[in-house]
Image (cartoon, rainbow, N blue to C red):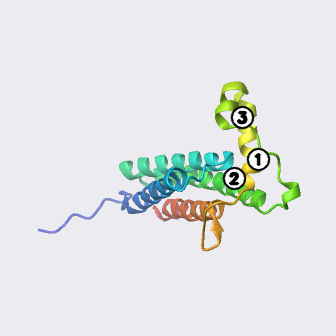
Amino acid sequence: MMAKRPAAGAPRSRTPYLIGFLAIVGLYCGALYLQYFLHQEPCPLCMVQRVIFILMGFFFLLATLQNPRAAGAKAYGFLIGLLAFTGIGVASRHIWLQHLPKDQVPACGPGLDYMLQNFPMADVLKELLHGSGECAEQGWTLFNLGIPEWSLLAYVLLGSLALLVAVKRK
């Protein structure tokens, strides 16, 4: 008995989406390890990057479960690519803050909990995206790259993966 060939336009492997999802789970577990075991408290820009990774992971998981055809793959690729591009911008801002001369580093702002309780949401978002003095502190490094550099690399790779899958689906 011969195996059936998939119909034209049939979904392909879920593997790239699953790889993207598992990579983000690994990144998030690493962030939690740094926070709770190495006591590296996340700054406002780190928190924004975490939210972006969570959203990307959500779309990678949805794509894994749905295994979309060409149009769906393009939509997922666009959404994940847009989130990755946003993450690249936030990580780049974070890297820039970390490389400022000490006398140009912005002052530390209020904590996130305080801002959420006392500021309008528009001001909270503005403060988060602007960054503060604590964002300029460079904590944990690996191969002389800090957390924002590794995040930037992850955004580029994961965004490229999503866009590559979207383009390859026919």
Q: Residue at x 38, y 48 (%)?
A: 66
**Which structural element holds mark 1?**
loop
Q: Position of residue 164 (x, y in %)?
A: 52, 64
Examine the image and state in which quarter residue 84 appears: bottom right
| Marks 3 and 1, how far apart at CA | 12 Å
* Cα–Cα span, label 2 and label 3: 15 Å
Residue 67 in view here:
no
- Decide if residue 42 is in sight here: yes
Residue drawn 75% across the image and 55% down it: 136
Q: Nearer the viewer, mark 2 or mark 3?
A: 3
Q: Secondary structure at mark 2?
A: helix
- Circles 1 and 2: CB distance less than 8 Å? no
Label 2: few (<14), some or many (≥20) within 10 Å?
many
Mark 2 touches mark 3? (CB < 8 Å): no
- Badge 1 density bin: few <14, some 14–19, many ≥20, Cα 10 Å: many
Which residue is under mark 2? 90
Query: Where residue 111 appears, x then y in whole percent?
Result: 69, 37
Query: Where is mark 1, residue-wise?
Result: 132
Left-right relation of 24 to 86: left
Give the camera-side residue of 142 and 87: 142
Q: Nearer the viewer, residue 28 or 10?
A: 28
Q: Which residue is mark 3?
A: 124
Q: How far, Cα to Cα, is label 1 from label 2?
A: 13 Å
Type of amino acid under label 3: Val
Residue furthest toward the right? 103
